[in-house]
Each structure stands twice: as C-alpha cells, then as structure tokens.
Image (tube, rainbow, N blue to C red):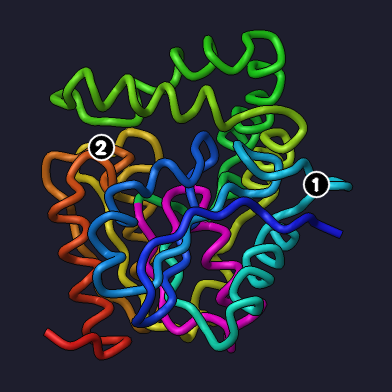
Amino acid sequence: MTPTPHLEEAGERGPLLLCLHGIGSSSAAFAPQLAELGRYARVVAWDAPGYAGSADPEAPLTLDGFADAAAGVIRERGGSAHVLGVSWGGVIALRLAVRHPELVASLIVADSSPGSGTDPAKAAAMRARAGELASLGPRAFAELRARRLVSAGAPAELVRRVTDTMAGAVRLPGYGYAAESMAATDLRDELPSVTAPTLVLCGDQDEVTGVEASQAIAGAVHRTAYVIVKDAGHLANQEQPEHFNAWVLSHLRITARIPE
C-alpha cells in the first residue's frame, strides 16, 4: 500500500486541479500555479511517493502504481479532477486518464513525452540516473542537471530555485522507481484511447523532451489543443508562469466552465 503523499494546496472553490511534477522535482515546482490558479480552482500539488515530503513507497512502484496513487488523491476529494502533469508528471497523467477515465475531467500535459521506452538509448540513459544519484548525492546531482531544464536566457535566480527544488526532492529509492517507470513506458499505442479533453504545452526551447515529443502526444490524442510557450525551456510552467497560467485558465474556462 502506498502512503498518502504530501500535498500543497491553494484555493477553496471551483474545480479540482491536481498538479503532478517532473522526475527531478516536487510540489514546489507549482508555486506559480498555486498562487495564481488558486484564485479560480482548488489547486493541489503533490510530492510523488518517495519524493520530498512524501514517505517512501513500501514496495517498488511502476507507472501504474504512481497513476493509482494520484487516483487516490482524487478519490479522497470526490468527483473528478483536471490533471496538470509536467514531464514525468505528464506521463503519469496520461496513464491515469487511461486507467481511471472517470476521475479525469481534462488533462494539461506540459513538456512531456510518451515515455522513455520509445527508444532503447533513452531508456538506458533513464535507468542510469539512479546510479548517478547514488554516486553524486542529491545536491551535486541537481547542480549537474538543473541548468539544462530552462532556456539559455533564464535568470540565475530561476536556475538556483530549480536546483534547490531538485536537491530537496530526489532520493532513493523513489527516484529509482520513477526512472524505471519512465524507461519501461511507451504510451504511443494507448494515447488514442485517452478520452479527456487535453491541452498540450511545450516550451519552444525545451531540450529535454523537446517539441517533437509533445507533438507526438497532441497528434495521437483525439481531443487536443497544442500550444508552444515562447522563451521557455523544459520547465515552461516556472519559466513563463504568466503565459502558462493564462493558457491553463483558458482551458479550464472551457472544460470546467469557470466564469470570466
């Protein structure tokens, strides 16, 4: 059984918006969304099992396990949720929408991919990350990776914030389970079965998953809108929060009928 994850929350009314972070992050990544979108929705951002403030899983988790843990968060609140997933969080969100369609009112999938299992080299590189974390430790691991997650023009303050978030979030065994869940996943065959209306966003300077991976999602899911976020790298929700939040709010106005 997976322990209840740590959650950060904002907003007391409106639709439920569940935010699922990337593989090197935590609920802290959604500070801009909690602050702004909490005015219109009940925003809940998790620390995935084995990350940051959440307890370690009692057994290894696959992608299905992470998706089921997210489903549990929604069930505790009743009804369904609009699910915002960034990178790895987007992969979890897509699997959640396939496994538990009744719980997903809509999807927002940002800077994500169909999984690392689409390419043997990508899968091998993803599996190697757990060993890198073990040998380097969280701080050095974060310092090595954080800069690549934002655009070349990103301010130093953002790079420091991303580094600090990663260093405080990742640890074994949870990160290893997450990396394996990505390495073992290829969602391409199941994407057409996603029924939830989906907004796909991608930073125009994303060098991690890249525009092509987001286009593959948008092209396969039947009910999609696709948006490029200018002047943003892999973490578009943090680098260009004003534009990112505006697109998410526009999506929620349509799918959840939030009033103007």
> Do the numbered discs 1 and 2 sit on residues whose CB atoms are within 8 Å?
no
Identity of the residue drawn at 43% across and 76% down: 16
Residue 143 image offset from top left, x and y in percent: 44, 13
Asked if the magenta segment contains residue 94, the reply would be yes
In the rendering, at what x and y percent does residue 111 appear?
35, 50
Left or right placement of residue 172 versus residue 194 in this view: right
In the depicted view, which residue is nearer to us: 142 or 210? 142
Residue drawn at point x = 30 percent, y = 86 percent = 255
> Badge 1, how many Cα within 10 Å: few under 14, some, many 20+?
many
Q: Quadrant of the N terminus?
A: bottom right
Residue 43 falls inside the magenta stretch = no
Q: Nearer the viewer, residue 101 or 169?
A: 169
- Locate residue 98: give its quadrant: bottom right
Which residue does the numbered mark 2 point to in the structure image?
A: 233
Residue lying at the far front in this picture: please name it. 12
Indicate which disc residue 231 carries: none
In this picture, is 12 found above or below 233? below
Residue drawn 32% across and 20% down?
160
Can you identify the residue that label 1 sits on?
57
Which residues lie in the magenta part? 85-110
| Horizontal relation, residue 1 to residue 106: left or right | right
Residue 230 as seen in the image, left or right of residue 205: left
Percent of width and height locating residue 219 = 35, 70
Picture coordinates of residue 125, whole percent (x, y): 60, 28
Label 1's element? loop
In the rendered view, does 89 fall on the left or right side of 252?
right
- In space, the residues marked 1 and 2 are separated at their CA atoms by 31 Å
Residue sitting at x 37%, y 28%? 162
> Which mark is first along the chain, 2 or 1?
1
